[in-house]
Image (cartoon, rainbow, N blue to C red):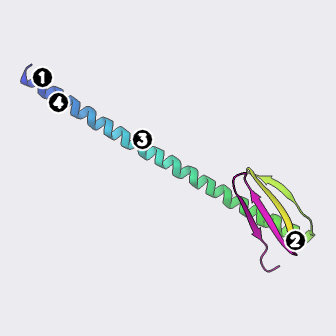
């Protein structure tokens, strides 16, 4: 094998290695961005559900009626426990209870 052919082969392998490493890094960045976007979306949905839960709780308190609705995969149900109104948020995996403060 000629010296020029060996140098060309080594350079081709180095360039291929650099391209592979760069591609893997780019895929890792895209995957990380996708995960961050998913977490931000879930947080936004939960924030909207909590706002709706608070409005539902205020309505139940003003009218004295228990209500149950489903919003974005969350089951919201108001209830009166020991004279204090609360709303339960349940998505099947987790349950959260928000109590009305000062009322």
Where disc 3 sits, the SS reads helix
The quadrant in which residue 48 appears is: bottom right
In this picture, residue 2 sits left or right of residue 100: left
Q: Secondary structure at mark 4?
A: helix
Q: Which residue is mark 3?
A: 27
- Residue 41, percent across and down? 61, 53
Residue at screen point 17% across, 30% down: 10
Looking at the image, tell me whether mark 1 or mark 3 is earlier in sequence order: 1
Please, what secondary structure does the residue beneath circle 1 have? helix
Query: Which residue corresponds to the image point at 82% horizontal and 67% vertical from the top-left?
Result: 57
The residue identified by callout 2 is 61
Closer to the chain start, of discs 3 and 2, is: 3
The tag earlier along the polypeptide, 2 or 1, is 1
Q: Which mark is residue 90?
A: none
Q: Residues within 10 Å of mark 1 (few under 14, many from 20)?
A: few
Q: Relative to the observer, which residue lies in front, 84 or 65?
A: 84
First in residue order: circle 1 vs circle 4: 1
Part of the protein shown in magenta? 82-103
Query: Gap in Å between the C-alphas at discs 3 and 4?
Result: 26 Å
Q: Is residue 24 left or right of residue 82?
A: left
Q: Position of residue 84 (x, y in %)?
A: 84, 74
Residue on which the image places disc 4 = 10
Judge whether 55 appears above or below 43 on screen: below
Specify the label residue 5 is tagged with.
1
Marks 3 & 2, CB-CB < 8 Å contact: no
For marks 3 and 2, give the CA distance.
51 Å
C-alpha gap between disc 1 and disc 3: 33 Å
Q: Are marks 4 and 2 in contact (CB under 8 Å)?
A: no
Dot placed on the residue nearer the N-terminal end, 3 or 4: 4
Establish if 70 lies above or below 22.
below
Residue 5 placement: quadrant: top left
The residues bearing labels 4 and 2 have C-alpha atoms spaced at a distance of 76 Å
């Amino acid at each position: 094998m000629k010296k020029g052919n060996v140098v060309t082969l080594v350079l081709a392998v180095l360039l291929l290695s650099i391209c592979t490493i760069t591609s893997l890094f780019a895929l890792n960045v895209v995957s990380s961005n996708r995960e961050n976007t998913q977490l931000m979306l879930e947080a936004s949905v939960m924030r909207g559900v909590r706002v709706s839960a608070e409005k539902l709780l205020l309505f139940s308190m003003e009218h004295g009626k228990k209500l149950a609705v489903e919003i974005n995969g969350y089951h919201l149900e108001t209830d009166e426990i020991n004279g204090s109104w609360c709303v339960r948020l349940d998505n099947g995996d987790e349950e959260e209870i928000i109590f009305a403060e000062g009322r």
